[in-house]
Amino acid sequence: GAVVSQHPSRVICKSGTSVKIECRSLDFQATTMFWYRQFPKQSLMLMATSNEGSKATYEQGVEKDKFLINHASLTLSTLTVTSAHPEDSSFYICSASDRYTDTQYFGPGTRLTVL
Amino acid sequence: QKEVEQNSGPLSVPEGAIASLNCTYSDRGSQSFFWYRQYSGKSPELIMSIYSNGDKEDGRFTAQLNKASQYVSLLIRDSQPSDSATYLCAVTPPDLYNTDKLIFGTGTRLQVFP
């Protein structure tokens, strides 16, 4: 089946630092990748849609200068949380859309803790 | 009105019973429908996808879609304690610019007790 990896799985950082999270589709090409955030006991919230070779589309209320997204190839998208603060602590999950089936497959997630 | 609605639960069923999870959506033009399972602290895992009216069966899982009623359900037969998780309903709305985007419900927590 389709496999999506994320790295790192867990990160703890100090307030004010930047954190980069990688999302890779391992066995299929993904023209579109999605970044979600999930706070405890809440549902997934879509942050942005990332299309290969073009600028990401951000959902309302998501700061594009704070959450930098790069989708350089059909198998890799990165999310950089810039100048992280404790309120950015959350579970960040990427998904990749198989271009042939329109099905989204999720990565294992990255748990970010900002001290 | 929320775009995708689910009862948050918990839905408690005994082991071996049928668990019935329901989802309604507001946009009549929605095209694709998915059920994901999410264990606590983990990311969602695709269980079923369904695109046309009727039933779709895969092992112990059956997805049912009724576009006229804007309703999609998931039946889990012979429920096992390992099925205990949150089940997320997701819908692809009609979107000229991004047909892959999913709208998620808040999820239904299922508890299967021995």
Image (tube, rainbow, N blue to C red):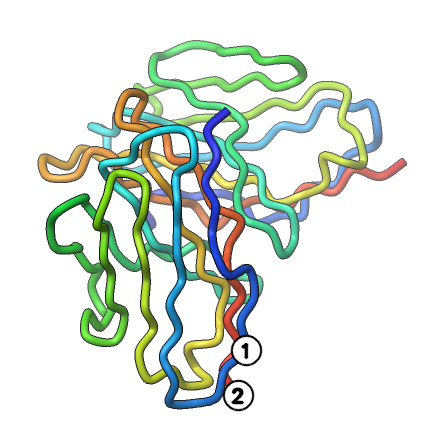
On screen, A50 above or below B73? below
Residue indicated by mark 2: A115
- Mark 1 is surrounded, within 10 Å at the Cα level, by few (under 14), some (14 to 19) or many (20 or more) other residues, namely few
Furthest toward the right, the residue is B114
Which label was assigned to residue A12?
1
Is the C-beta separation of discs 2 and 1 under 8 Å? yes
Give whichever of B83, A17 is nearer the camera: A17
Give whichever of A81, A38 is nearer the camera: A81
Give the distance between the C-alpha atoms of the residues marked 2 and 1, in whole angstroms.
Answer: 7 Å
Quadrant position of residue B81: top right
Mark 2: amino acid = Leu
Mark 1: amino acid = Ile
Would residue A2 be found to the left or right of residue B2 on screen?
A: right
| Chain for disc number 2 | A
Residue drawn at the location 51% of the way across and 36% of the way down: B36
Residue drawn at the location 49% of the way across and 31% of the way down: B35
Q: Judging from the image, what secondary structure is the residue with disc 1 in?
A: strand
Residue drawn at the location 45% of the way across and 40% of the way down: A4
| Chain for disc number 1 | A
Residue B4 at what x, y percent from top left? 37, 42
Residue drawn at the location 75% of the way across and 40% of the way down: B12
